[in-house]
Image (tube, coloured by chain):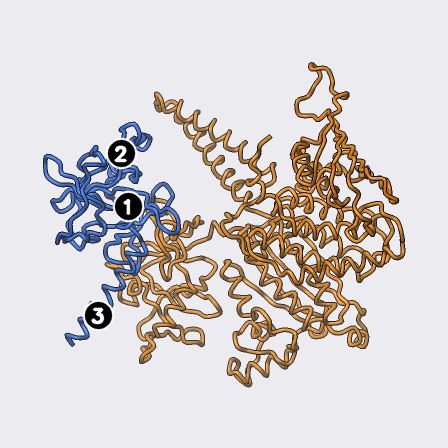
Chain colours: A blue, B orange
Amino acid sequence: MMETKNTELATTLGTRSLKRDILAEGLQYLTFNLAGEEYGIDILKVQEIRGWMPVTKVPNAPVFVRGVMNLRGAIVPVIDLRLRFGLEAVEYTKITVVIVVTVQSDSGSRIIGMVVDGVSDVLNVNATDIKPSPDFGTAVHTEFISGLVTIEAGMVMLLDVDRLLSIDEMFALEAVRTTESRGVAMLAA
Amino acid sequence: MAIDIGQFVQTFFEESLEGLDIMEAGLLALPPGAVDMEQINTIFRAVHSIKGGSGTFGFQDLTAFAHVMETLLDRMRQGQMDVTSEAVNTLLESVDCLREMLVAARAGAAVDNDRVEHLRERLHLLLNQVNVAVSEHTASPSPVSPTTTPPTGWRINFQPHSDLMHNGNDPVRLFRELSTLGELTVRCDPRQLPHLAKLKPEDCYLSWELELQGTVSHEELVEVFAWVEDDCDLRIEALAKEPTASNPVVARTPGEEGQQGELLLERRKSEDRRQSDRRGPAPADTASIRVGIDKVDAVINLVGELVTTQSMLSVLGVDFDMSRLDKLHEALDQLDRNTRDLQEHVMRIRMMPVSSVFSRFPRMVHDISGKLGKQVELRINGEQTELDKTVIEKIGDPLVHLVRNSLDHGLEPPAERLEQGKPETGAIMLNAYHKSGSIFIEVGDDGRGLNRDALLRKGLDAGLLKPGEDYSDEQIHDLIFHPGLSTAAQISDVSGRGVGMDVVRRNIQDLGGSIQIGSQRGQGTQITICLPLTLAILDGQLVSIGQDCYIIPLLSIVESVQLRAGSVNRVAGRGEVLRFRGQHLPILRLYQMFGAEGAVTDLEKGLLVVVEADGRQVGLFVDDLQGQQQVSIKSMEKNFRRVPGVSGATILGDGRVGLILDISGLIRVNNAVT
C-alpha cells in the first residue's frame, strides 16, 4: 500500500497552464538524464511525472515496450527510452521515473509513458539559442533530435517526442530489426 | 444578423436525411388511390423543409429537385392529382435520388446528373398530366406551368408574421437576394410597430412593399421566398400591363401545417435519437448521437448526488475519529450506489431504439417483394427496444441479409402458398425484446422452412457429418452457418449477393452475441439473435499465466479441465491435441504465445480452459483460474495499437491492467501457425 502511495505522489506539473507568451519567445524544456547524457523535451508535451511501478506486459511487443499501465483508467503504453535508443538496460531504482507525454500522431493524440533514469530540471531556452543538431555518431538517431542547447553544465539534446514515440514507427523499426537479425542468423547458419 | 451558417450545415444534412426517412415511410404507408391527408401532409412538410434548408445553404440542385417533388405533392394534397402507384414509385425513387444528392453534397462529391435529370423529367411528366387535366389552375407555381413572357417588374407585398426571425430568417437577406435579380425598391411599413415599452426585440413588426424592376420570372421570385412562405403573407403582382396582367399568388400558412420551428422540434421528439445516415461516406464527420433530454437530466441529477456524497466524505475526512466510523460506512455505501447508478445511466446515453435499424425494412421488403412477385406483410414488434449504438450500427447488415433470405428463400410464391393452404400473403416478423440482461432480435417468416434432408445430404457430401449417426435438428440447421456450404437446393439466383450466413454469424459473434435458428418444414424459419446489452462491459474469467493476469470472456468458455498424464498427443506438425469428448482439441500454450515468464509449463500442473469461437474449440493452457468479474473494456488502440490475440484491456481490482483475450483472434493465430 505504502509503495503505491509513493508512486501516486506523482508530480503533476503546474506548468501546463503557463503560457509560452509570458516568456516572450522563451521555450521551456523538461530535462532528464539518460545514460549520463542530458535530454530535453518540450514541457507542453509533458502531462505528468510518475514513479516507476510495475506494468502489465504486452505480448509480442518490441523489447522497449515495457508494457501498459493504468493511468486513471486509460491504458497507456510505457516505453523504456534506454532500450528505445538501443542502450544497455539497467535495473529500475527509486529515482527511475516515467514521464507521461502527449504525442501527436496521424491518428490523433496519444498518451505514452517513457522511462528515464531521472528528471533533472526545467530549462528556459531562447529560441535563438537552439542550434541545429550536427550529424554526430551518438547512440541516438539524429532524426529524433530537434536541436541542441548549451548550458553551463554541458549540452542538452532536445528531443522531438512526436517522432521518437511514434508507435507505428517503433513497430516498423522492430520489424526491420527482426528480419535483419533473422537474416544474419540464416547467413550464420 | 451575421451568423456563420456553416456550423448548421451538418444539422441540415442530418435533419434532411431524417426527413427523407420520414418521406419514405410516409410514401410506403400511402395506399394508392386513397387520399390520406395526414400522410401526404407529413411527406409534404418533409420535402418542404429540405427545400428550404438547401436553399439557405446554397445547394441549388437540391432546392430545384425538391421543388418539383414538392409541387407534385402539393397537387396531391389539394386533390388535383390522384395518388397512383406510379406516382408513389416515382416519388420513392426521387427520395433515393435526393438522398444521394444530399450525401454527395455533404461529401462534396459529384452527383449522377443524368439520373437527376431523368427523374426530374418523369416528375414533370406526372405534373404535366395533371396540368392537362386541371388545365389552368395555378394555385402553386410549378416550373412547368405555362409561363407567359415575364413581365418587366413585380410588386411584392411582404408581411412577415411576428415570429419570422425566430426561425433564423432575415428579411434583409431576402432583399439582398432580390436585389441580385433586378432593381429593387423597398418601402418599409412601420405602422405595426408597438410602443417601445411593449416591443419585443426578437419579433418582427415591419412589413414591406417591394418593387422589382427587370425581367424576372415568377418562379424566381417564389424561389427567393421559398424558405419563409410559411411565415409570412406574401402577395406578388406583376407590374406590367400585359394581357396576363396580375397573377396574384397568396402563399399562406395552412392551419395544419404549423410553423417551421415547431415542426422541427416535433420531429426531433418523435424521431428521437434516430441515427441519421448510415448509407453514405461522411468525411471529416465525427459521429454524433442524439440523446433524449431526459437521459441527460438523469445523469446530471446523479452527478449532483455524487457531488453531495463527495462533500459529505470530505467533511468526514477533515477530522476523522473512530466514533464516526458508522457515518463513513454510510457515506461509502452511498458513494457506491451513486457510482453504480451513474454508470448505468451513462451507459443508457449510448442506447438507441432498434427502430433506427428496423425502419429500413419496410422499404426493402416493398422493393424486393415487388421484384420477386411475392406478397409480403412485414410485422415489426418491439421497435422501442434500446441497445448500444455500436451494436445498432453493426447489426444492420446482418439483419438485412437475414430478411432478404427470408424474402427470397423462405417465402413461397403466392400460387405455391395457396396450394399448401396458406394465406396468399406471406409474413415476415421482426421482433426485438430484452430478456435477462440481453437483447434478442428475431427474424421470422412463415415460409417453407429449411429443407432438413437437403441440408443433411449437403453435410454428408461435405464430410461435415458422418453417415449413420443421428443428428438433432439444431445440428443440421447449424450447417447453414458453415462457410462454403451452399444450400443450393433452396437458393435461387436472386440471392448470393452480399454476405453469407457464416459472415452473419461472425458479425454477431464479433459483437459478443450468438445466433440460433429454428425451422419447421413448411411452417417457416425463425432466427434468433442474442446480443449483449452493451459492448463496454463484459463478464470475464480471470486466469493467471506466470506473473500476468489475463481475462477470458465468460461467454466463450465451454469448460475447464485438469489434464491427466497421457491424455495429450503430439501430432507431427500440428502441435498438441487432447482427445476430448470425441474430438481432437488443439492446445494453445498461452505462456508460449505471450512469452510470459515464470509460468507453469507442465501440462498436468496447470489447467486447460476450453473455449469456443467461430464454431471451433481450442484449449487454452493457463496456470490457474482466478475469480470471475465484470470488467469494463478499455481500448488498447487509443494510445497504443492493436495487439494480436488481445481484444482490449481493463483495469483490475488492484489497479493493474489486465489484457482481455480475443478468442477468435487466438484461434486464427493458431491456425496460421499450424
Left or right for A117, reference B568: left
- The residue that disc 3 covers is A182
Q: Amino acid at mark 1?
A: Gly
Q: Examine the image and state in which quarter residue B297 appears.
A: top right
Q: Amino acid at mark 2?
A: Thr
- Residue at 64% x, 69% y is B405
Q: Residue furthest left?
A: A153
Number of residues whose C-alpha sits closer than 10 Å to that of mark 1, classed few (under 14), some (14–19) or many (20 or more): many
Q: Quadrant of the N terminus of chain A?
A: top left
- The residue that disc 1 covers is A113
Left or right for B514, reference A105: right
Rounded to the nearest whole Å, what is the CA distance between mark 3 and mark 2?
A: 43 Å
Number of residues whose C-alpha sits closer than 10 Å to that of mark 2, classed few (under 14), some (14–19) or many (20 or more): few
Q: Examine the image and state in which quarter residue B421 appears.
A: bottom right
Element assignment for label 1: strand
Which chain is disc 2 placed on?
A
- Residue at 67% x, 58% y is B96
- Residue at 64% x, 44% y is B272
- The residue that disc 2 covers is A11
First in residue order: circle 3 vs circle 1: 1
